Amino acid sequence: MSGRVGDLFGADAARLDETITERLAGFRSSTSRFCEEHVAGQHQASAMPAGGMPAEEYIEYLFRQVVPSAVRTHRSRFIGHMTSALPDFLVPLGRVITALNQNVVKIETSNGFTHFERQALAMMHRLVYGRDERFYAAHTQDPDSSLGMMVSGGTLGNLAALWCARNHRFAAQKGFAGVEAEGLAATLQHFGFRRAVIIGSSLMHYSMRKAADILGIGERNLIRVPATRESRIDVDRLADQIERCRRDDSCVLALVGIAGTTETGAVDPLGEMADLATAYGTHLHVDAAWGGPVLFSEKHRGLLAGIERADSVVIDGHKQLYLPMGLGVVVLRNPQMAKAIEKTADYIIRAGSSDLGRRTLEGSRPATAVYLHSALHIIGQRGYEALVDGGIARCRFMAAEIRRRDEFELLAEPQLNILVYRYVPAALRSRAAAGLLTARDNVAINELNVRLQDRQRQEGDGFVSRTVLANTRYGAEVPIVSLRSVLANPLTTQADICDVLDEQVRLSLALDVSETRLSPFDEHEVYEAVEALEEIDQVAPVAAVRCRSQ
Amino acid sequence: MSGRVGDLFGADAARLDETITERLAGFRSSTSRFCEEHVAGQHQASAMPAGGMPAEEYIEYLFRQVVPSAVRTHRSRFIGHMTSALPDFLVPLGRVITALNQNVVKIETSNGFTHFERQALAMMHRLVYGRDERFYAAHTQDPDSSLGMMVSGGTLGNLAALWCARNHRFAAQKGFAGVEAEGLAATLQHFGFRRAVIIGSSLMHYSMRKAADILGIGERNLIRVPATRESRIDVDRLADQIERCRRDDSCVLALVGIAGTTETGAVDPLGEMADLATAYGTHLHVDAAWGGPVLFSEKHRGLLAGIERADSVVIDGHKQLYLPMGLGVVVLRNPQMAKAIEKTADYIIRAGSSDLGRRTLEGSRPATAVYLHSALHIIGQRGYEALVDGGIARCRFMAAEIRRRDEFELLAEPQLNILVYRYVPAALRSRAAAGLLTARDNVAINELNVRLQDRQRQEGDGFVSRTVLANTRYGAEVPIVSLRSVLANPLTTQADICDVLDEQVRLSLALDVSETRLSPFDEHEVYEAVEALEEIDQVAPVAAVRCRSQ
């Protein structure tokens, strides 16, 4: 092709690369400037530029109008989200993924990257299940086995795992073509079930609700068992619930354990859940999107004991594997389980072919396995262990600092590296210490913490997120607004942590005096305060719902 | 963090970048070397290196052991897949996406990239629906409207669109909490339906089967109406089918039109389908994963007339928008429709927030909108028009070349830029010309073409894919193995096309004499020949199924 458009293909991008290198260096050392209204106004035009524009000019626009607003997820005092600084080698390796543009759905469009991805999945499988050499010799590269699958993130991972569970439970048999062919309504009718259910704690991530919706199960049939004060599922009540389901013709498709809740990083008693799953012959899925990498740590992996008995486990790459956004992994205990979702291999993709797309949720996919494979090799077992141990140590340091300071109240003992706490204004500290806070007091403290977190985000140097907790010492009726710190960034120092807390004290003092209403109690105020929150990391504050419907 | 692992974060990657630049330059000019067994053997180890390895050493390994096998999707004679050379500016821009590591699920982790993505979606919406300025002024940046959503590819796009259709059809109303809460079984019972169905042509992409399975509808309830000889849905039979569904208490959730079938690039009569959808009050979804960008072309956009009446349309970024793997777009005619999949906004994500994650299938997502937004601006309307027109012109040139050569038979008149044809051995050419080929002859020709495509892939300089066609002049009983050429790469010249065909003639002559069995007809042979195929681009050769079950 001649002319301008043809010139955009197959040439050398060295000059653009140089520009980008220069601009990115500037970005790293700058701070975010963001006015939502302004940026929205700048991105209003929907007509396409007819003639196109030079790439240089576009990059100029991008770094002038959009990039300055970008959230500095790499900063050491950005300790509010599940996003951290990334290892440096990932940006150069990302270029390889884009430049090679392989499509790993089929071996014909990816060749060796198929086996490369399988190897990375086997390593993740081994991390979770730790089977012997013979097992991996047999399954790692056998096209007929699936040790897992890559997905674009934890939401799809949870969906894919529960899809496997549903189809495996209702597989084809004599006189029944399987749920994938018959659909869920005909399937339940065939087996005489009133409904199919999934059971987990009230702290399940909201992606479970998406999955229950999409799979045709219905959110009403995603049963939430209360969590203990330690944010772990109440196993006795779980057992009761399973029994109740058996009696009322509900088919339990899966139990869902959580290894690292979004709110506080709590881990369910996975061993006891596995006992129940075994006893009732039910699929056990573990959402270890956040906590999975704790398995790298000799010291802390015991927290996840029992995970090796799960049928499926989801681990996010872009969380504690420190990979770029857009990468999750599902591993499956039984290498044959994914056959339950295989799209009739005999005529879509030849049975026995090496095509990874035979058993994945997505179709065409990039070779993002390069990120996972490279990090597992370059960071290695001990590197990940150091990252995990470092995060937990940092979290304990911060918890101690909070205990040491009168201004703060620790809201839960951290299990991993997520910390929930809040600021308590001077006027209420003695009542707080004496355990005498009223609901009215808590509404006022909630309001103050909402405002504090907002102000630090907008004006401060540090950043923590906030969430709403249902199971604090104040009971489920009083949802507590909590500051939430995620200690995952290896660049965060003890000084950073102290600075973030000092800044909060400084900002709160100002708010304390001038703005906080310690106003008369209004019965709707609790709910209004909760509704006014913008949820961070999509935490589901169940209490808010529970309170409102009661 | 001190020590080795800490050193991997927050430093400068300039040296690694240089190495990668050098290696990628070498890659572009080399050819693929791939021995599956060898590469599989190299990727057998599943133990993680305990101590990690230097990034330089890893890159050395990657470029020595994996990259050499990579499929050269950028080559001008690689005209078999829906993957082409990419515009150069995308690799540098990919670095921006990785380095900034924004998470567009929430505005708090993406800031201005939220509005930036909304603008790109509005441009795509305008391409399809062409609404007026007032419409876009109202909806482009209104957090309460969704002009569409980004997905990791067409498979998820089709799933997301049908998820919207299902939930919109069975939305909450008095006495009914909506399918998302109730589940599909209770929903059908509530409305007195026996089943829910989706109807499209027999040439629907296999991702529709995935969607029907996942959504709990069942593949059996994905009804495939026969296509005409031109690979377009038979509208009369479609109307009959809808009527039949009404009579037997089947709820028609959606009609699915195809704009560019995977096999031959055919386009369904979208206007007539829209008439039916309107008449019956049914959702019309158009899978324009391949053909959508034809809308950029003044000359050819009429082929897709009626698409602007569809309720949802999927267009893949990594196909004819020339973006890297892993990006698709769904656009929705009604900016409120995505509310049907919103995860109860009042407590997961605050109602009225700008968070894109309120209404997407995926959760955490990278800002791949940078690829889409940049290409729409840099390539522009006329650039994409030139790419589309160029591909169609190239395809017509190749069709003319094939007609000109005795050795080949054109199997369908191309509608866009995909061409299906086959090689006919000398001994059968006169019978072919006279229209006297028997089923036995076709089996032999099938076998020869399978072998020819294999050999060219392994030894040749050119590359085309192959598929199996059910609706050729030989009728549905005789599935025809077809060579398939996708003319999307703007670097492909007329000389490249002639060279690919010349090479096929050369390779076939050798096969013709020494290896092809023009053997006695065996009634299973047709099916065996079909089963022996490795499907390219996941084409669903329905004929194969149909034949076997008859």
Image (tube, coloured by chain):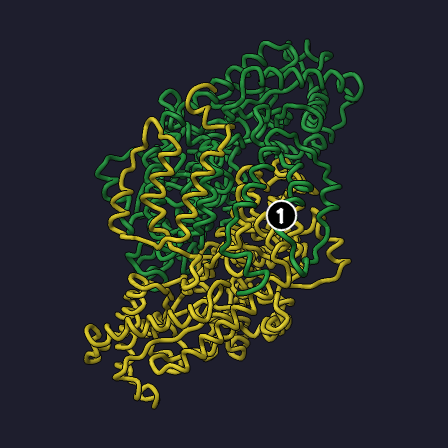
Chain colours: A green, B yellow
- Vertical order, A327 against A487 (above or below): below
Q: Which residue is mark 1?
A: A56
Position of residue B41 in the picture relative to residue B495 (left or right): left
Position of residue A86 in the picture relative to residue A280 (left or right): right
Place of residue B251 in the rendered image (x, y in percent of width and height, measured from the top left): 54, 65
Place of residue A142 in the rendered image (x, y in percent of width and height, measured from the top left): 27, 48
Position of residue A310 in the picture relative to residue A450 (left or right): left
Quadrant of image for the C terminus of chain B? bottom left
The type of residue carrying mark 1 is: Glu
Please indicate, yes or no, whether residue A281 appears anywhere in the rendered image.
no
Residue, x 40% and y 72% (percent of image)? B498
- Vertical order, B48 against A394 (above or below): below
Location of residue B72 (image quadrant): bottom left
Seen from the viewer's position, the closer of residues A499 and A158 is: A499
Place of residue B296 in the rendered image (x, y in percent of width and height, measured from the top left): 62, 65
Position of residue A174 in the picture relative to residue B113 (left or right): left
Place of residue B460 in the rendered image (x, y in percent of width and height, measured from the top left): 32, 64
Seen from the viewer's position, the closer of residues B138 and B63 is: B63
Chain identity of mark 1? A
Location of residue B467 (image quadrant): bottom left
Give the SS element for disc 1. helix
- Vertical order, A504 against B213 (above or below): above
Residue, x 45% and y 28% (percent of image)? B8
Location of residue A67 (image quadrant): top right
Please indicate, yes or no, whether residue B476 appears anywhere in the rendered image.
yes
Residue with the most extreme right position: A514
Residue with the most extreme bottom position: B434
Seen from the viewer's position, the closer of residues A513 and B239 is: A513
How crowded is the residue under tag 1: few (<14 C-alpha within 10 Å), some, or many (20+)?
Answer: some
Seen from the viewer's position, the closer of residues B100 and B126 is: B100
Residue, x 63% and y 63% (percent of image)? B382
